[in-house]
Amino acid sequence: MDETDEIRGTATGTAPVPLSVLDLVTVGAGRTATDALGTSVKLSRLAESRGFHRYWVAEHHSMPGVASSSPAVILAHLAAHTTRIRLGSGGVMLPNHAPLVIAEQFGTLEAMAPGRVDLGLGRAPGTDGATAAALRRTDRLDEGGDDFPQQLAELTRFLDDDFPDGHPYARIHAVPGPVQSTSPGGVQSPHRPPIWLLGSSGFSARLAGVLGLPFAFAHHFSAQNTIPALDLYRESFQPSAVLSSPYALIGVSALATDDEKEARRQVMAAALNMVRLRTGRPGLVPTPEEAEAYEFSPMEREFITSWNANVIHGTADEVRSGLDDLQKRTGADELMITGNAHGGDVRLRSYELIADAYGLPKP
């Protein structure tokens, strides 16, 4: 496969660039994690049938409203319900895990869904410091992620099974993986999950550029850094065996509804959820009715205004226009849409409307 198959997508319909899905597996008030995961299955199949390029899930911990603490487990489930769409992590928070474990997990996923698995990596904990310490079984937490490049290099060596002679890990192999092709009678898949670096600032942007890797930027919660980070990535880029030129996607928060007023109601509920998370009160995604009845303080109202300014929402035509404008301003090579709402039916309808607005193929 060339890089167009495994990294660079192809735009369909009238979309300016490939469109993809970021799923946080959100759990609404009155719903269960089972409900949320059921929505993920439906959404992955909808995305596949409508021509979205890839479907990623993100690692979060200790958040009642986000049921994506185990991306590899969820991706295995989605692999069993899809056949073509690329599946991946957006991302695995590498400092929370031993690199060998991630190589084994994604080698297993690659064996389940050959040629359609992405390994997106982040260096943030995806949670608060105490939870990160519990995940890592240590009281010493390197919040700066200074050893991330070393962890990345180790993970890459395990995926490629190419530690040099004399290295302490030279006789250790990630299985499933390339070592199986060197065993008597061994036959190994030619695919290896491509590594993406994720970021919300300049650190991973520069690292992805220097290493010649694809880059995914979290515009949906760090919009002020989007263009500087993408510029840094492109300026730092060095061609590699993975990519001949830069390739950057951005995560975008977007929600389309049949009625503009309903879009505002749903977005306010998601914003209230963010207020609670940012103030140390994480919970389930509230209903629009709860958000309408909530008395926001002046500081909370200011946060809501700032947060919602970067959420593209409204009718399908309004969302399409907003996505088009964002792609032009950033030059993003791909838009990865996350649609957060209380109910799974609202999220599913949003992606249907966006697909229709761009004339994406219908099953």
Image (spheres, rainbow, N blue to C red):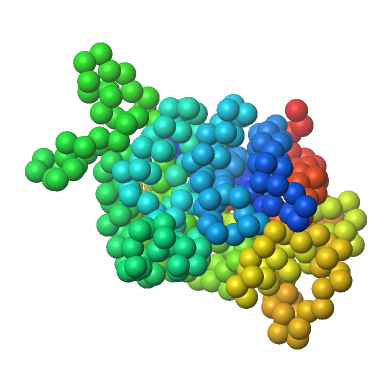
Tell me the quarter of the picture where residue 186 sits.
top left
Q: Is residue 65 above or below residue 86?
A: below
Is residue 280 visible in the rendered structure shown here?
Answer: yes
Q: Seen in the image, is 162 located left or right of residue 176?
A: left
Q: Position of residue 266 (x, y in %)?
A: 81, 60
Q: Is residue 199 above or below residue 304?
A: above
Direction top: furthest residue: 185
Q: Position of residue 117 (x, y in %)?
A: 48, 37
On the rendered image, what quadrant is the C terminus found in?
A: top right
Q: Residue at x 75, y 49 (%)?
A: 31
Q: Seen in the image, is 174 located left or right of residue 29?
A: left
Q: Position of residue 258 (x, y in %)?
A: 88, 51
All told, the count of numbered labels is 0
Tell me the quarter of the picture where residue 284 sits.
bottom right
Q: Nearer the viewer, residue 197 or 171?
A: 171
Direction bottom: furthest residue: 298
